[in-house]
């Protein structure tokens, strides 16, 4: 029986290639190009003062005397300026691009994004709070924490989130169970 | 389990980097001297700081400092993912890890060389190429992992092979001699039929089965 070519499922290699093309396209359009041209979309610019106010709120809960002026958070004798890269936008775009590009039903993509986005924003806020504390109490470790530790931690967190999404949501597709 | 492995390996590699990171950067800096020499920079030596490599040149005013925070990020993330990847034969894991490291280090050699050669004192007037390479450097370990260990990301969506039988339709569960023809006729070629995940997995396990034999 001759079977037409279209009915064959895409090979693993094709799946990976398709994933990489869509992923790169989204990532470049949403992050790499704005980063290179230094023109982030207005939504991201608005995220900076919002993140600053969240950070200020948490620091004041921790007992610091905080003042927030736009994107500048001042506490004690220290100050942090929240730029686009500090908002978690990088991680959000990375996660979004992977979830959209990965071969899975739209409903699962939406669930993944609905769960992933708040978690990434929360993790980023935790990162900012810890860095603010490092700056206040152990400023000599600030560069280390900022440039080494949290860069690695953020990427690992996003990868972990993606794997969790694939393992728990995408992988749980119903199939008929068969008895032997 | 995979998540625990990722966190454990990244923590271990992070600690390891604290011990050997400076030597790794020194070795990387030495390799970068080769393209710098080829392109007429006339390097006289390097010096490694905590997060930067100083490149010294015989030409006055061309000494450069390059931040290298991307290097440990790339290496630690890639090694953690490679070691935590879903079951892969040891030989293949070693080969893919070495290949990935080679790519990663080559990228950093090119990146650092370009930063020294196309240096600009103000960040805003940096060459676009260099600005683009920075975010690419963050992404590279993850992309290398996806390419070199496709089962790491693409293996998780798989339905276990034990849930399929050769003569049972993966979509409706009825017994059929020619399951593939049954899927096409009964469920169609679309996403609810032959292109559904269950059907694709069935075909992965059994191929076209009896229909191939009956040709």
Image (cartoon, coloured by chain):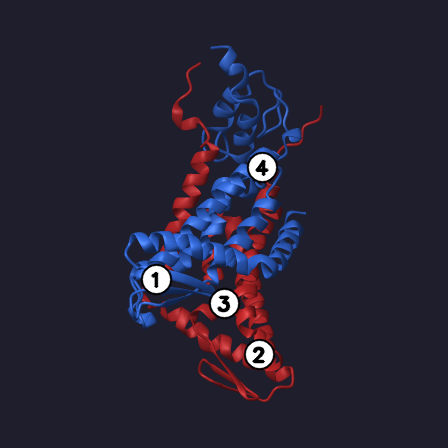
Chain colours: A red, B blue
Question: Which residue is at 54% across, 18% downward?
Answer: B209
| Element carrying mark 1 | helix
Q: Which residue is mark 2?
A: A139
Nearer to the camera, A151 or A69:
A151
Residue neighbourhood size for the residue with mark 2, other residues' Cα within 10 Å, grouped as few (<14), some (14–19), many (≥20): some
**Please, which chain is the residue tagged with disc 1 on?**
B
A3, above or below B16, in the image: above
Find residue A23 and name its label. Answer: none
Q: CA distance from mark 1 to mark 4?
A: 46 Å
| Element carrying mark 2 | helix
Q: CA distance from mark 1 to mark 3?
A: 16 Å
Q: Which residue is mark 3?
A: B49
A142, above or below A95, in the image: below
| Element carrying mark 3 | loop
Image position of A72 (left or right of A65):
left
**Please, which chain is the residue tagged with disc 3 on?**
B
Q: Which residue is mark 1?
A: B116
Residue neighbourhood size for the residue with mark 4, other residues' Cα within 10 Å, grouped as few (<14), some (14–19), many (≥20): some
Question: Which residue is at 51% across, 51% downward?
Answer: A109
Tell us which disc is closer to us: 3 or 2: 3
Does residue A154 appear anywhere in the picture? yes
Nearer-N-terminus badge (3/4):
3
Q: CA distance from mark 3 to mark 4?
A: 46 Å
Q: Which residue is mark 4?
A: B158
Q: What percent of the width, then of the height, locates residue A155?
A: 53, 58
Nearer to the camera, A168 or A158:
A158
């Amino acid at each position: 029986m001759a079977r037409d070519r279209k009915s064959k499922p895409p090979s693993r290699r094709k799946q990976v290639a398709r994933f990489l093309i869509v992923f790169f396209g989204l990532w470049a359009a949403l992050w790499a190009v704005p980063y290179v041209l230094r023109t982030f979309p207005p939504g991201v610019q608005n995220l900076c003062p919002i993140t600053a106010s969240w950070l200020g709120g948490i620091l004041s809960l921790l007992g610091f005397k905080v003042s927030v002026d736009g994107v500048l958070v001042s506490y004690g004798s220290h100050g942090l300026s929240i730029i686009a890269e500090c908002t978690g936008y990088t991680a959000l775009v990375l996660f979004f691009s992977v979830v959209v590009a990965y071969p899975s039903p739209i409903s699962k993509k939406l669930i993944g994004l609905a769960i992933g986005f708040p978690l990434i924003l929360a993790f980023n806020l935790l990162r900012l709070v810890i860095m603010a504390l490092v700056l206040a109490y152990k400023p000599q470790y600030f560069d280390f924490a900022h440039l080494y530790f949290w860069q690695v931690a953020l990427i690992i967190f996003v990868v972990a989130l993606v794997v969790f999404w694939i393992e728990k949501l995408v992988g749980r597709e119903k199939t008929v169970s068969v008895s032997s | 389990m995979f998540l625990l492995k990722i966190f454990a390996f990244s923590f271990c590699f992070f600690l390891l980097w604290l011990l050997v990171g400076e030597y790794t950067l020194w070795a990387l800096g030495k390799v970068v001297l080769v393209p710098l020499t080829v392109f007429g920079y006339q390097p006289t030596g390097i010096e490694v700081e905590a997060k930067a490599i100083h490149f010294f040149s015989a030409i006055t005013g061309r000494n450069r400092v390059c931040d290298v925070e991307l290097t440990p990020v790339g290496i630690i993330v890639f090694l953690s993912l490679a070691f935590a990847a879903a079951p892969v034969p040891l030989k293949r894991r070693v080969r893919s890890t070495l290949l990935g490291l080679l790519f990663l280090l080559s990228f950093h050699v090119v990146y650092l060389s370009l930063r020294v050669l196309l240096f600009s004192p103000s960040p805003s007037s940096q060459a676009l190429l260099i600005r683009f390479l920075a975010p690419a450097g963050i992404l590279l370990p993850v992309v290398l992992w996806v390419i070199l260990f496709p089962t790491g990301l693409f293996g998780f969506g798989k339905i276990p092979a034990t849930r399929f039988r050769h003569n049972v339709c993966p979509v409706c569960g009825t017994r059929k001699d020619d399951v593939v023809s049954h899927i096409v006729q009964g469920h169609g070629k679309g996403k609810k039929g032959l292109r559904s995940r269950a059907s694709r997995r069935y075909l992965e396990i059994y191929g076209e089965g009896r229909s191939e034999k009956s040709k």
